Amino acid sequence: MKYSAKWAVALSVTAAAVLVACGGGGGLDVQDTSNQAPPASITATIDASTTVVNSPIAALDKEAIVFTGGVSEFGTTLDTTITIDTAAATPTFTVSDSEDEATGEFSLGSCKFKITQIKRGRIRVGAPRYFVGQIITISPCTVQLDTSAIKPNGQPQATKATLVFGTKKSSVINTKITVSSTGEVTVGNIKYPKITLIPVTGGS
């Protein structure tokens, strides 16, 4: 399925036997949303055709994103923390665990990390873990938003987000999401393509 938007939104539902469709430019045009709900979760794919500040990754701006047990692409096996500054003129990142820390430039396609400075590193036999100029590319790179308790009322509501590298999920980050009565999703100042709301039987 192709989208004309600058980034794609893939929808996944935790409950079996519920089919969720994506809205091309429509979504449900409803006034009474008492019997409508978003899907249980939305996975936002990070697309290179947009800017970092306007991508789903901006929902996690400057948050300490922890990957328990490390990130294979970074060569880490210890708990690894990644922080991304999406608002900078040139977006930056820091990656660290108890042994190494490096900083650099962050870009999309899906997620690219270019090392520009080694802040600390354990001495190893052979090559070091990081080196200046190194580019680490992670694809797919997605942001997953929990929408299981979100009401489509156009009001910001607290939810949880995770950064996902392939199938590796980060710790949970608290954020806010808004879903309109027509299915338009907003996280911070970022608007996503409309989703199709799910009819809820027996809703109040």
Image (cartoon, rainbow, N blue to C red):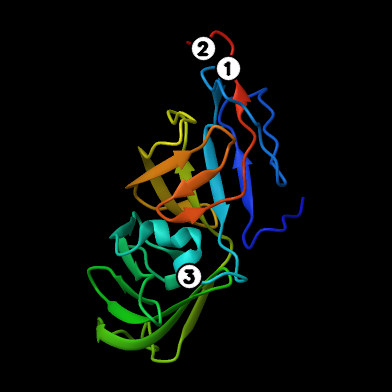
- Provide the residue designation for mark 1: 200
Q: Who is closer to the viewer here, 164 or 71?
A: 164
Mark 1 and mark 3: Cα distance apart in space:
35 Å
Q: Who is closer to the viewer here, 151 or 142?
A: 151
Mark 3 and mark 2: Cα distance apart in space:
38 Å
- Residue 94 is situated, as x and y percent measured from the top left of the image, at 31, 74
Q: Is residue 174 depicted above or below 55 in this figure?
A: above
- Disc 1 on helix, strand or loop? loop
- Provide the residue designation for mark 3: 52
The residue positioned 36% from the left and 44% from the top of the image is 176
Q: Is residue 95 depicted above or below 59 in this figure?
A: below
**Residue type beneath disc 2:** Gly
Where residue 37 sits, quadrant-wise, is top right
- Disc 3 on helix, strand or loop? helix
Q: Is residue 86 depicted above or below 20 in this figure?
A: below
Side of 174 where 53 appears, left or right = right
- Provide the residue designation for mark 2: 203
- Residue 51 is situated, as x and y percent measured from the top left of the image, at 52, 72
Q: Are marks 1 and 2 in contact (CB under 8 Å)?
A: yes
